Amino acid sequence: MTQTLRPAIAPVTAHRLRARLMWLLVCVIALAAVVAASLALGARDIPLARVFEAFTGTATGETDHLVVLEQRLPRTLVGILVGAALGLAGTLMQGITRNPLADPGLLGVNAGASLFVVLAIATLGVTSPAGYIWFAFAGAAAATVVVYGVAAVGRGGATPVKLALAGMALTAGVTSVLTLVLLTDTTAMSTYRFWAVGSLAGRGAAGTADTLGAVAPFLAVGAVLAFACSRWLNVLSMGDELAHGLGVHVPRARALSMLAAVLLAGSATALAGPIAFVGLVVPHLIRPLTGPDYRWILAYALVLGPTLLLAADVVGRLIAQPGELEAGLVVALLGAPVMIAIVRKAKVAGL
């Protein structure tokens, strides 16, 4: 299913600019509120005053201080980065493929990362989250290269439809291999299932600094490249022929946009596992506020992505006390109805 986005990017009037800036400010305030909730709420509720004291050092050595700084702060930082990366990656993939149902899973990113992680567990004995990172990232990158290479073969090059079909075919094939490996290796199955569910839990301060330090450069490059590609995405939304007529090198624009998407989605998957629906839902929440202009959609995605993921993480902590539901499960519960609504809307529109 493909959808050609509205071709006209209307000039931004002063009124429209103020409205977009106002809504962006509202989104930033919402993110700040969710960050505060992430630091304060959980199996052990901590008043915001105590959270502030933990950062100022006036509660040194106390349990609340340790919970905030050693457990919840690293978890919140990971949630912010992963949510922002998935929001940007989903926006890019919907722009590249002109498909309203596109997310990091469509081009095989999640499947490639999962396969490489399972192979690392089964053949190399990798068991730590820090060890998964490079294999997950390599798998995401390899899957995207294969998908783009397959789609680029033949007449017309890597068109949106061919990219989507190649991604679905690769995901189906990789999932079969993945299942075969897991069914024949119970140790790999036991270790993999904790990573595959998609979670921000278990992010202690000791390992988070090194992990974020390793992945942060890729996230930064991906984010910068994503915003640099925003104008190209606006033109590509009009169709390849018109974009070519306007002087855009379509294969190069699409390849660079895909590179940004895989850097972002691969980093997010490496940090927190294959979390679905964030990249799918976020662009659809944004477009009613911004219209089809990808410069604004990406700016909003940078804020709404972490807001959605951290909110899901907080909800998961509160509804299953004294345990918790992983953020990936909560996002899926929220995202599935949204996906159904998107499909129904597209069907009504005759797409």
Image (cartoon, helix red, strand yellow):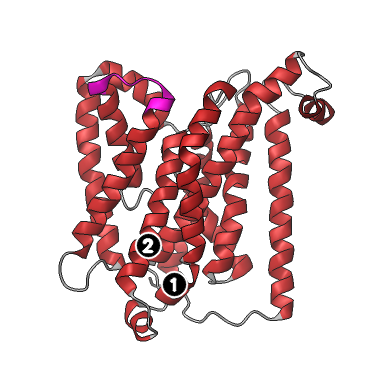
Q: Is 73 located above or below residue 93 in the figure?
A: above
State if disc 2 and disc 1 touch (CB < 8 Å): yes
Q: Which is nearer the eye, 165 or 244?
A: 244
The label number, if any, that marks residue 13 in the structure image: none
Q: Going 57% across and 49% down the picture, which residue do you hit?
A: 305
Q: Is 194 located above or below residue 298 in the figure?
A: above
Q: What span is in magenta?
A: 122-131
Element class at badge 2: helix
Count neighbours of disc 2 (C-alpha within 10 A) and say few if under 14, some if 14 to 19, many if 20 or more: some
Q: Quadrant of the N terminus?
A: bottom left
Residue 130 on the magenta span: yes
**Residue type, mark 2 in image:** Leu
Residue placed under numbered mark 1 in the picture: 232
**Residue type, mark 1 in image:** Trp
In the rendered image, residue 129, in percent from the top left (x then y), is placed at 43, 25
In the rendered image, residue 270, in percent from the top left (x then y), is placed at 42, 36
Q: Which is nearer the eye, 141 or 167?
A: 141
Residue 345 on the magenta span: no
Q: Quadrant of the C terminus?
A: bottom left
The label number, if any, that marks residue 256 in the structure image: 2
Q: Is 96 located above or below residue 134 in the figure?
A: below
